[in-house]
Image (tube, grey):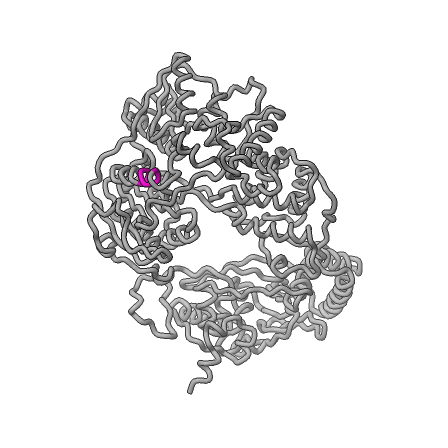
Amino acid sequence: MPIHFARLPPELADAALREPLITPNERLAREAAAACNQRQLDLGRRAWPRPRVASLRRYLHTRFDAAANAQLLSSEAELLLWRDTAEPSSLHLAEWAAEAWALALAWRIDPASSAFEATANGRLFQRWAARFRAELKAGSWISAAELADAATPEAGDLHLLGFERIEPQTADWLARVERAGGRVHQHEAAESPALSECRLRLESQADEISAAAQWARQTLTEDGAARIGVVFPYLAAAYHAIDHAFGVEFADAADAFDISGGLPLTEQPVWRSAELLLDHVLEPANPAPESLLRAPFLDLPSPLSFEPTRGRQPFAAWMARFHKVLQQVRWGAAAGSVQHQARERVGDCMDRYSALSQRPNITAAEALRTLKDLLSAQEFAPERPPAPIQVLGYLETTGLQFSHLWVAGLSDANWPLSPAPNPLIPMELQRQCGIPRIDHPSEGAFAQRRVQHWRTACQHLTTSWFPAEAEGGEACSALIRPLTEVSIDVAVGNHRRRRHPWLALAPEPASEAAPPDQATPLDAEIRSGTSLVRDQAECPFRAWAVHRLGVKAEQSMELFPDALTRGTVVHEAFHKLYRDHERPFSDNDVSTAVQATVAEQLAHTPARFRANEQSRIEAIIHAWLEHEAKRPAFSVIGLEQDAELTMPGARFFLRIDRIDQDAATGAQIVIDYKTGAVSVNRLLDERLVEPQLPMYALTDERIRAVLYARVGDEEIKLGGLGGDSLTLGRSPEGGWDSLRDRWREQIAALIEEFRSGKADVAPHHPQTCRYCHLPSLCRVNAIMAAP
């Protein structure tokens, strides 16, 4: 069933298909449109006109007469114009100036009025507004605050829903609608007293957020049809904490909740990476800071070299330059869904800003600073589907209806909120014009209306508060004292006080201690590669930490490729040679394959290093080909061959370096390239710490040998284990088939260990811990030193 939070009378829902239904904000417009559509579905209709529901601002936009030779500025364009017209010392007040302009027009205050001369800030705004108005006129633009004066009235019926207050400018526009032959109908949102109300005390803001998330989860579990609202007056300030708490509580049902608002674009990780790079381009550091080198979302070239950013250019030219720099490093190309959305928003903003600014030529630093300021004013949140739980700010419940509502943060120190008059309009002028929420009496009246609204906007109301730390407040707001006080355990059954996410999701109580070497048994099928079996054989704790907890080794940044990377390059060179060229290989074939590999894999290294690596790898390959020429006749039938091994309770996805076929017997031979030291004897150990080749052998009955190809600087060698009919590799005791059966039993035993939860700190060999990344987690040194 579609989810919506607005309840409309049937006649209003039907009228909205023919006549405009206007709301004070986008959220109520969205919910009212959903209610209209639900009404048509309930009537059994399969098609109907799109409801004419819109917020006041969006509706006025549609009625704006474009023939007036004026262009409507977007909010970004308007803010940029306020910055462009600011005096140098008042640039930081641009957002206040935009708000003052909107208030002045909404409440019919002339910015040129002598009343502004009463204060220094008023005089500042008066000069600023004059320059802003002149730029609007010169550019044939209008601001969003002027829409009501420029929009063309629509003859016919017009419906207003959820307006608690109508400013003089809006009232004038409605009067114009009526003079044009239209009729204005005002509708109040459906409200009725709550069936139950209560208040409760929490110890801190963190406790309150966690309790509200738990309550929302329990309420939805008990009533799947519930329409739940959670209101935080401090939503913007505590967005991270609120998002985290609800994300933890709904880890298995992320689509169950939606959080209003968002965070500034400048706080998104994908932008922070871009910012590090652009800062470096403006002021290059040698060497580049580690924070830049480790930044995600950037494919950095080596050396870091970009065009200089000296001189002065138009803002649009700098935006184009910044775009080019970000394209060079494939910024955000591999970003996940959320960061991809953020990257697209940043890119769109940069494109829009490029066409807006009328400022004279500026430096790159000034352009970047302006870009950061503009992006910080852009709120971003990932797109989410409609959800039964809405996490909202205190203004966003207007016109909405909930089955269950929790309103947080209602202490005497925090509610009513502190007044927030605009500092650029003289206080006395704001009082004379009736601008709301500018002093304590008007803020108190507003807070009282909000509480009364919440008490009639739901069936079940829960309010909460916590003692203010700084102010020393120890009581709830006087506006909720009439509500029944209950304990947290009554309001939130099985309440957990600020528990760690892992503990919160654990199926057993934390008081039930598990054996120190035993993890929870695993019921699900294992899906992995060979590393899981190898880690379990080398140390059960490592397998548990890496493959159950996901504690992966963090790869450190290196100025030059380490042994692992260099080995990968050799491996890839062999692959290119055998894939792209026919045997027998010429010297040119070898050179071509190695050159392509080095250019691709080591592009970020100096040319001298690449040349040395090419010579080294060519020498290795030539030595290998000479060694391989002594083998009995064979053909290469598989390169980087994908394979699958199914065992009881596990499925492994493998990639075999190379498969040859013996010309005499038709047997298949697996070859695995190794640039480091290897020992065939480890394939015969009682505990199979090198399971890779054995697992390859079990994928296909036709495989009759598994061999290591040692292709290092110091040794070229081919060795392993094989069937009696093959001259390659030594024959195992008991024969090849017996060895395969033994390997299968060993691997099955290791799988069973992992599935049963065996996770003791038991390294197979002291060398096991040498390169392990988990000593601080397993405390192996302390364990081994214990008597």
Q: Quadrant for residue 660, please give it.
A: bottom right
Furthest residue in direction front, as rendered: 118
Give residue 135's position: percent from left, percent from top.
61, 28
Specify the segment rendered in magenta: 442-447
Is residue 486 visible in the rendered image? The answer is yes
Give residue 702's position: percent from left, percent from top.
55, 63
Inspect the magenta stretch and tell me whether residue 446 lies in it: yes
Question: Relative to residue 318, is residue 530 drawn left or right?
Answer: left
Q: Residue at x 75, y 69 (%)?
A: 623
From the viewer's perspective, is residue 431 above or below residue 749?
Answer: above
Q: Quadrant for residue 33, please give it.
A: top left
* Secondary structure mostly seen in the magenta stretch: helix
The N terminus is located in which quarter?
top left
Q: Looking at the image, how many numbered discs can be counted on the residues?
A: 0
Question: Relative to residue 407, is residue 285 drawn left or right?
Answer: right
Closer-to-camera residue (644/553): 553
Give residue 613's position: percent from left, percent from top.
74, 64
From the viewer's perspective, is residue 76 above or below residue 155?
Answer: below
Q: Residue at x 52, y 36 (%)?
A: 97
